[in-house]
């Protein structure tokens, strides 16, 4: 694993996202100022930082003193103005440690990059980002904070993740149901290879509790295309199962099953009002993130 | 319907059909382990496709095996043959005679199967197709004479047993005579007056088995003599039967090779068509049983439908009786691929020539001519010449035969000489000026066939008219082993000898017992010229003239050299009787036991003993007449003072009958014409032209199967 803050936030990815603003589709429970329409105005006055004035900001929150000093309009921001509280749920099970080809990111590394980038963007615009690493149970949690210094903690936690154990995303859902009282955005990074086929039903519980749920379905291209030729003894990465098969014999059935599975996941996500993004580890991160962020922006507007 | 293969040896290729199985069992690739996250999908995919894959694997295996097996079978050129025999002979009820050709040529292997097997199967099928009202009989013709067929009857089981137990012979069969025998059987009242008469002959249609100049078979019926209908079942199915054979073998001494050198001449022939045979390997075998060796290999060229002679020279390591065989590589008819011959190689004879009148002029030397004759390259005699003065220093026991040429006296050696002869040694006495009759009568009284009397001068050599007045050999015992070599014009060499002087013998005064002397040659005045006598175990021969040119000119006659050599061998006991030439199978021959022996059994070429019937009680053991039934070297087991043993001097060789080697096939038109035309006779199984529709080639079908299997395999793999 590389040092936090470097590879996880690749400059080219960040440069590509420089002009975009993360928008949320629904108004989160929490404070909202600036571009965000919050139902609870000025409930907290704990100054957090200045923000350059932009059309749409409340005029009453302009810091005239600062204008007098700098001849620029700034808006005062307070802690409660954080308009979004996001939980980044990263699947760190054993299956996420696989890479289909040397030189390619493993699924966990790819998911870490994605989640780290999103955390960086959120913190940069004073949104709170927290981390939940999960395998069979919640392995690590970092509560959401909007402070810039919090980003390091998130990225450090991501960098320290090692794949292992079985997948059980329901544990993360239960954990969030129990602990996330305020509305939040839950972004899940997982291959969804969960023995529990009702894993999306668990995530839909969060949606029913007004959380905004997004699933980044992280898969290696080899899992989708099954490009093997020689007789192979396939070994499970999460338990002791193994199966000997000639890829030539099972490819067709495998591809049909994977295709049906992806289709089912998409359909169930749509039915549960969960955003779904298929992230292949051979895709550039901006290719994955930009459509997602643009969609967010459009829905927010 | 039966299956035949043009190249049955290629059926070994069927083993290649095991390749897919062997590859599956022994060359399977080991799977590579690979951790894989989506294992569940692989498991489910495998579970869902497992039955289909298993079926596909089986189909693949079947397709690959079928591909190889069909290709291998196709290369063997199979064809399905449906004999028409049954249909042919069942047209109308008739009394039927089944004739099975069991001659040697029926051993011909066609398509990996002897013709005899095909012929038997054909006749069994005919038998199965007979109606219940049709009586039948059967003849198996394989012996020297056609067998007597029983009257036609309804005991099908007995006929079937007869045909199934029949074996092909090694001799020649006269099928014309067999058909006549079958016609006689059909003439029996048991054949039924109202039924037709039919003969079914299963044969290879070899032309030599038929005598078309003989009367065609006729059946006597109450209505008179009628021709039977005849069906010839061609066991060869119209195919040509090319055959290479050794049809003759002869041997004669070859002095150029050495004293025991022989020249063996093999006659090789090619029958039944085909191309000329080039570089045919030929091997010469010497000896029988465990002593058999293969000292020589050669190559021969045999023209198509012709014969060639190949001469092989061989020097035998030792003298005595032996056997030689010449063999070709085995072909479809193996019975005539080798021929054997028995011969007796002369043993080496050690001769002592005592020169009683040496001369510095070689032509006048007493021993000059004798030594030259005995020491020739072709002679098995090794002479040692000594003067009369050197006689005391010689041991007679070191020699097999002693030549005393005009020796004045033996002195003290006379008794040693008598003992030498008594123990089996040979003695030849030639006379001359040095010989004193009285002294000889005194010293050699026990050895001389007759006492010497006086010298008679028939003519003075060189005098006018001496040639006409000289004595000539008149009464000659040509049957004597030493003289039997002279036959025909060769006898002139003895009859032309002129003798001017010779010693007369005292008449009526025999030194030995009566009957132990034998006058082999007399002069034209009746006086003995050459007399032989047995003395103890040995033999003594007395020549009453000289063996130089003083008293006779025998030494310059052509008969001198062979006569002296054979006399030396005879006196030394090394001259065997002339061996009989090999006979052919089924030819009778007489085997005469040697003195004191009784023949117990014959040992055939395969090593099986054939016991001879014991002689009648009280009868003296004598010659046995035997009829060998297979070619090859035969040995004779005798009983004598040594006990029971094989007697190599009695071994003899039997040749395959050359008529059976000739596999030239008879023109079906000729034989049907002889049998009464196509209305009465037909040949079935003449091949594609004569039996259209009976033979179905299968190789094209098999190739189609192979192509289909190949395509199926590709489809399954795709």
Image: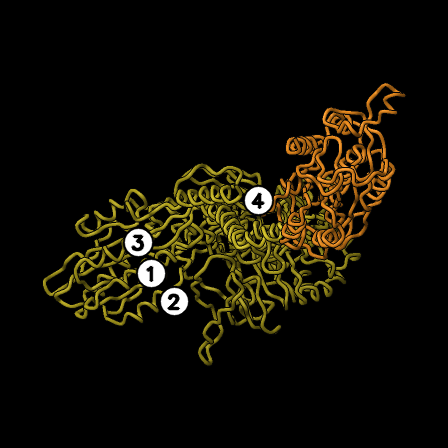
Please report, as a chain letter, where disc 3 is located: B
Residue bearing the label numbered 1:
B141
> Looking at this view, is B501 or B678 the one in front?
B678
Report the side of B216 relative to A37 (left or right): left
Which numbered disc, 4 or 1, marks the residue closer to the eye? Answer: 4
In the displayed structure, B649 sits above or below A221; it is below
Colour of chain B in the rendered structure image: yellow
Residue bearing the label numbered 2:
B165
In the displayed structure, B604 sits above or below B434; it is below
Q: Secondary structure at mark 1?
A: strand
| Residue A196 circle label | none
Which numbered disc, 4 or 3, marks the residue closer to the eye? Answer: 4
| Chain that is coloured orange in the picture | A
> Looking at this view, is B680 or B253 the one in front?
B680
Badges 1 and 3: C-beta atoms under 8 Å apart?
Answer: no
- The Cα–Cα distance between marks 2 and 4, rounded to whole angstroms, is 86 Å
Report the side of B394 relative to B12 (left or right): right
- The Cα–Cα distance between marks 1 and 2, rounded to whole angstroms, is 13 Å
Which numbered disc, 1 or 2, marks the residue closer to the eye? Answer: 2
Q: Residue at x 78, y 25 (%)?
A: A53
Residue bearing the label numbered 3:
B83
Please report, as a chain letter, where disc 1 is located: B
| Residue A267 circle label | 4
Q: Secondary structure at mark 3?
A: loop
Which numbered disc, 1 or 3, marks the residue closer to the eye? Answer: 3
Same-chain check, marks 2 and 3: yes
């Amino acid at each position: 694993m590389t040092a936090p803050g470097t590879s996880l936030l690749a400059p080219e990815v960040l440069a590509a996202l420089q002009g975009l603003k993360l928008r949320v589709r629904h108004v989160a429970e929490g404070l909202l100022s600036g571009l965000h329409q919050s139902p609870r105005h000025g409930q907290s006055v704990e100054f957090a930082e200045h923000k350059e004035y932009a059309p749409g900001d409340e005029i009453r929150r302009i810091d005239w003193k600062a204008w007098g000093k700098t001849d620029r309009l700034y808006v005062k921001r307070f802690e409660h103005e954080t308009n979004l509280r996001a939980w980044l749920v990263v699947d760190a099970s054993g299956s996420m440690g696989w890479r289909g080809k040397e030189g390619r990111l493993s699924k966990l590394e790819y998911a870490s990059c994605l989640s780290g980038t999103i955390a960086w963007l959120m913190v940069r615009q004073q949104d709170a980002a927290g981390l939940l690493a999960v395998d069979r149970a919640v392995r690590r949690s970092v509560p959401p904070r909007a402070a810039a210094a919090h980003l390091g903690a998130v990225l450090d936690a991501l960098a320290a993740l090692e794949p292992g154990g079985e997948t059980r995303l329901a544990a993360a859902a239960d954990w969030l149901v129990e602990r996330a009282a305020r509305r939040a955005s839950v972004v899940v990074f997982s291959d969804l290879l969960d023995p529990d086929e009702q894993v999306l039903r668990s995530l839909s519980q969060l949606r029913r509790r007004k959380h905004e749920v997004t699933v980044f379905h992280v898969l290696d291209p080899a899992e989708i295309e099954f490009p093997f030729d020689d007789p192979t003894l396939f070994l499970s990465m999460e338990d002791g199962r193994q199966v000997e098969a000639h890829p030539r014999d099972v490819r067709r059935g495998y591809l049909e099953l994977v295709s049906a599975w992806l289709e089912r996941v998409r359909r169930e996500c749509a039915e549960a009002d969960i955003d779904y993004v298929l992230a292949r580890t051979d895709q550039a991160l901006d290719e994955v993130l930009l459509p997602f962020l643009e969609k967010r922006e459009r829905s927010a507007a | 319907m039966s299956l035949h293969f043009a190249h049955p040896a290629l059926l070994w290729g069927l083993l290649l059909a095991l390749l897919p199985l062997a590859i599956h069992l022994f060359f399977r690739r080991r799977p590579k382990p690979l951790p894989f996250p989506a294992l569940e999908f692989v498991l489910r995919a495998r579970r869902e496709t497992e039955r289909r894959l298993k079926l596909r694997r089986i189909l693949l295996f079947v397709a690959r095996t079928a591909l190889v097996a069909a290709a291998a079978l196709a290369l063997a050129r199979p064809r399905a043959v449906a004999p028409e025999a049954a249909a042919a002979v069942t047209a109308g009820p008739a009394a039927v005679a089944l004739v099975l050709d069991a001659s040697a040529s029926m051993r011909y292997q066609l398509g990996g199967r002897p013709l005899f097997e095909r012929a038997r199967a054909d006749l069994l099928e005919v038998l199965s197709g007979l109606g219940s009202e049709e009586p039948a009989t059967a003849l198996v013709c394989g012996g020297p004479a056609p067998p007597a067929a029983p009257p036609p009857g309804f005991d099908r089981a007995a006929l079937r047993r007869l045909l199934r137990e029949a074996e092909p012979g090694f001799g020649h069969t006269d099928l014309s005579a067999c058909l006549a025998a079958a016609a006689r059987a059909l003439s029996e009242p048991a054949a039924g007056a109202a039924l037709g008469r039919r003969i079914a002959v299963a044969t290879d249609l070899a032309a030599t088995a038929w005598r078309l100049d003989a009367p065609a078979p006729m059946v006597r019926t109450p209505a008179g003599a009628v021709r039977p209908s005849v069906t010839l079942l061609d066991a060869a199915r119209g195919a040509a039967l090319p055959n290479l054979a050794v049809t003759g073998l002869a041997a004669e001494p070859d002095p150029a090779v050495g004293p025991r050198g022989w020249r063996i001449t093999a006659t090789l022939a090619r029958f039944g068509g085909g191309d000329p045979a080039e570089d045919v390997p030929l091997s010469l075998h010497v000896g029988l049983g465990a002593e058999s060796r293969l000292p020589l290999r050669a190559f021969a060229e045999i023209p198509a439908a012709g014969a060639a002679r190949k001469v092989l020279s061989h020097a035998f390591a030792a003298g005595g009786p032996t056997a030689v065989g010449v063999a070709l590589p085995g072909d479809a008819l193996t019975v005539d691929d080798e021929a054997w011959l028995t011969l007796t190689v002369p043993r080496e004879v050690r001769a002592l020539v005592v020169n009683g009148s040496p001369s510095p002029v070689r032509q006048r030397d007493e021993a000059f001519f004798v030594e030259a004759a005995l020491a020739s390259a072709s002679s098995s005699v090794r002479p040692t010449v000594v003067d009369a003065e050197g006689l005391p220093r010689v041991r007679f026991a070191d020699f097999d035969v002693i030549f005393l040429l005009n020796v004045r006296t033996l002195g003290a050696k006379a008794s040693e000489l008598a003992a030498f002869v008594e123990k089996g040694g040979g003695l030849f006495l030639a006379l001359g000026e040095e010989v004193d009759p009285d002294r000889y009568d005194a010293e050699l009284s026990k050895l001389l066939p007759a006492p010497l009397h006086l010298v008679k001068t028939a003519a003075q050599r060189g005098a006018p008219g001496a040639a006409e007045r000289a004595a000539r050999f008149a009464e000659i015992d040509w049957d004597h082993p030493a003289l039997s070599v002279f036959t025909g014009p060769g006898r002139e060499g003895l009859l032309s000898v002129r003798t001017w002087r010779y010693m007369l013998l005292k008449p009526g005064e025999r030194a030995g017992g009566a009957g132990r002397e034998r006058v082999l040659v007399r002069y034209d005045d009746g006086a003995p010229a050459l007399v032989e006598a047995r003395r103890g175990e040995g033999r003594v021969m007395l020549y009453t003239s000289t063996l130089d040119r003083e008293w006779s000119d025998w030494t310059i006659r052509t008969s001198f050299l062979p006569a002296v050599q054979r006399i030396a061998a005879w006196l030394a006991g090394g001259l065997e009787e002339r061996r009989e030439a090999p006979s052919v199978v089924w030819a009778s021959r007489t085997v005469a036991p040697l003195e004191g022996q009784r023949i117990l059994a014959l040992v055939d070429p395969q090593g099986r003993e054939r016991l001879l019937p014991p002689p009648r009680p009280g009868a003296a053991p004598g010659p046995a007449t035997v009829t060998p039934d297979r070619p090859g070297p035969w040995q004779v087991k005798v009983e004598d003072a040594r006990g029971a043993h094989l007697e190599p001097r009695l071994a003899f060789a039997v040749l395959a009958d050359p008529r059976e080697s000739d596999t030239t096939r008879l023109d079906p038109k000729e034989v049907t014409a002889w049998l009464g035309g196509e209305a009465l006779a037909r040949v079935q199984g003449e091949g594609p032209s004569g039996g259209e529709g009976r033979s179905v080639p299968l190789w094209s079908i098999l190739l189609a199967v192979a192509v289909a299997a190949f395509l199926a395999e590709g489809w399954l793999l795709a």
